[in-house]
Image (spheres, coloured by chain):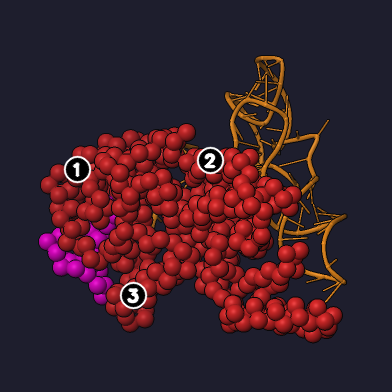
Chain colours: A red, B orange
RNA sequence: GGCGCGGUAGCCAAGUGGUAAGGCAGAGGUCUGCAAAACCUUUAUUCACCGGUUCGACUCCGGUCCGCGCCUCCA
């Protein structure tokens, strides 16, 4: 079965190929930079990273745009509280976001775009919507009239036909003609920053930036649009309403939504004290790869229950695969090539690929990797894994890591160089030979204290950093 | 109330008409000067519950219970 994704729009899993050529045009709703991103955000961005990597593994080129929302109510409020400009305030968190992406090994999209750098484009789009009769002005702000867009609700599968245009649904919404209408351009209030434009002085609503930046860089119809489930409504619904009202063409072919992450089965919130950023977890001593593995290992459409037990388990799981690789790199094997094993390697890779083709079933793809590792380990112990089989096994691990990217340790815990470690091991071997176990054990303990773990095997000493 | 997601071993989790992948933890073993590390083996007569369809259901249908998300800019 070919590559396929679950499409929120059709509520079905559908075969995927790009619309135009070999390039996948995709858009991701990025962060609002009013704070450090939390691990819930990072779950979604990790999904998007796995998606990128798998599309490329399947031979596609990428043109991927992610936005940075750098103007918004909380930003304005927080910036004002700190007596900073919007730019000064958001710069800190934008930079932090890039750092977090690097730490988690999230690939940079081909283009990262900021809302504040596209104000003119947004104004033009709103004017176009006005020309087509989709807007109205109320108290200086420009609103989108959803009653004029027939397909409204098709993404979130809500039926809004019962909402009558012009009805005053809620007294609190006195400035809107219809409860679901949303703001395209917000008129400036006292003391707020604003842009002077033909629409008046103010700032853009949230939804318009994504429509505008997506179409500016990717064309009128995108292949894929991703985001968290919570964005399905109203954000993505509104993006469709805006974009399709302007172009008259389908805005997005495949809508992919990542489920939420909870913390110990509870919603993450500051009041519960279970609000974690990547920096928090690293500060507790967890490795970035562990976080990445945990976030990637649960298929993206399934709720992910984040626990520290799970985070520790992730670290151990990675270790298992690293050990397997270490073995492939160091074991002395008999010459030759075991054809049966070649076949099983091929089958394992196939299982791995097919799992990811199936709407990025990462859990199943991991199972294929672990099963193969066990099979190969057993074969090695039995002397059936020959030197000619190493390349195939390493090839599988490379493929695995081109997607999961967890095998290479992030940072060296030890300040010792490889040569220094080798020298100490030689010293210990000499001590062992002389049956000076006190000295041998001291060297072993010294190395352990610096994060170097020795493995005494039949073939001699093997070591790794931990 | 509407829309959506889910309930599989101690924990995480795949599967989805043919009799339960994988990881962690636990238990046992191999190796070892000791130890560690590593590796191997092992752990659900059972898939929230009740009916139904079927030769056969965790998987399909109907119903019930429970958890969660969205429905005013939260990934």
Of pointers 2 and 3, the one earlier in the residue sequence: 3
Q: Are marks 2 and 1 on the same chain?
A: yes
Q: Are marks 3 and 1 on the same chain?
A: yes
Q: Residue at x 70, y 78 (%)?
A: A425
The residues bearing labels 2 and 3 have C-alpha atoms spaced at a distance of 44 Å
Q: Which residues, given as a range, are shown in magenta? A: A182-211
Circle 2 packing at 10 Å, graded few (<14), some (14-19), many (20+), is: some
Left or right of A296? Residue A173 is left
Assess whether residue A223 is covered by the magenta stretch.
Answer: no
Instruction: Identify the chain of the residue marked 1, using the numbered disc in the image.
Output: A
Residue furthest out toward the front? A335
Asked if residue A231 can be seen in this view, the reply is: no
Of pointers 2 and 1, the one earlier in the residue sequence: 1
On screen, residue A348 above or below A62: above
Helix, strand or loop for disc 2 = helix
Mark 1 sits on what residue?
Answer: A247
Marker disc for residue A91: 3
Asked if residue A413 can be seen in this view, the reply is: yes
Of pointers 3 and 1, the one earlier in the residue sequence: 3
Mark 2 sits on what residue?
Answer: A350
Assess whether residue A195 is covered by the magenta stretch.
Answer: yes
Helix, strand or loop for disc 1 = helix
């Amino acid at each position: 079965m070919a590559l396929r994704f679950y499409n929120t729009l059709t509520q079905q899993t559908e075969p995927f190929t790009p619309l135009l050529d070999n390039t996948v045009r995709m858009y991701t709703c990025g962060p609002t930079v009013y704070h450090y991103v939390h691990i819930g955000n990072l779950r979604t961005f990790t999904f998007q990273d796995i998606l990128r990597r798998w599309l490329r593994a399947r031979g596609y080129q990428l043109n991927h745009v992610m936005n940075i929302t750098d103007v918004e109510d909380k930003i304005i409020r927080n910036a004002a509280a700190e007596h900073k400009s919007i730019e000064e305030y958001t710069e800190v968190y934008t930079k932090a976001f890039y750092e977090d992406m690097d730490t988690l090994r999230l690939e940079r999209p081909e283009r990262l775009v900021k809302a504040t750098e596209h104000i003119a484009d947004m104004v033009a789009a709103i004017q176009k919507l006005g020309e087509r009769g989709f807007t109205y002005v109320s108290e200086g702000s420009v609103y989108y009239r959803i009653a004029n867009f027939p397909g409204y609700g098709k993404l979130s599968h809500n039926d809004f036909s019962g909402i009558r245009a012009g009805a005053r649904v809620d007294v609190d919404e006195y400035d809107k003609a219809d409860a679901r209408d949303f703001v395209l351009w917000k008129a400036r209030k006292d003391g707020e920053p604003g842009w002077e434009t033909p629409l008046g002085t103010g700032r853009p609503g949230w939804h318009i930036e994504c429509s505008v930046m997506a179409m500016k860089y990717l064309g009128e119809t995108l292949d894929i649009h991703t985001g968290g489930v919570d964005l399905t409504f109203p954000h993505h619904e509104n993006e469709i309403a805006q974009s399709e009202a302007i172009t008259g063409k389908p805005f997005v072919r495949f809508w992919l939504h990542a489920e939420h992450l909870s913390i110990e089965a509870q919603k993450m919130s500051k009041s519960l004290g279970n609000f974690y950023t990547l920096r928090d977890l690293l500060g507790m001593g967890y490795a970035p790869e562990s976080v990445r593995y945990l976030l990637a290992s649960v298929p993206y459409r399934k709720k992910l229950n984040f626990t520290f037990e799970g985070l520790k388990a992730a670290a151990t799981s990675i270790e298992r695969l690293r050990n397997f690789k270490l073995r492939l790199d160091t074991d002395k094997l008999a010459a030759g090539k075991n054809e049966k094993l070649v076949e099983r390697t091929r089958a394992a890779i196939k299982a791995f690929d097919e799992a990811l083709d199936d709407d990025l079933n990462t859990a199943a793809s991991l199972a294929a990797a672990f099963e193969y590792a066990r099979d190969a380990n057993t074969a090695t112990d039995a002397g059936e894994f020959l030197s000619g089989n190493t390349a195939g096994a390493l090839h599988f691990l490379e493929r695995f890591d081109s997607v999961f990217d967890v095998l290479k340790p992030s940072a060296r815990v030890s300040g010792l160089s490889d040569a220094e470690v080798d020298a100490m091991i030689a010293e210990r071997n000499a001590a062992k030979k002389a049956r000076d176990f006190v000295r041998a054990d001291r060297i072993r303990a010294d190395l352990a204290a610096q994060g170097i773990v020795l493995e005494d095997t039949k073939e001699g000493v093997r070591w790794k950093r931990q």
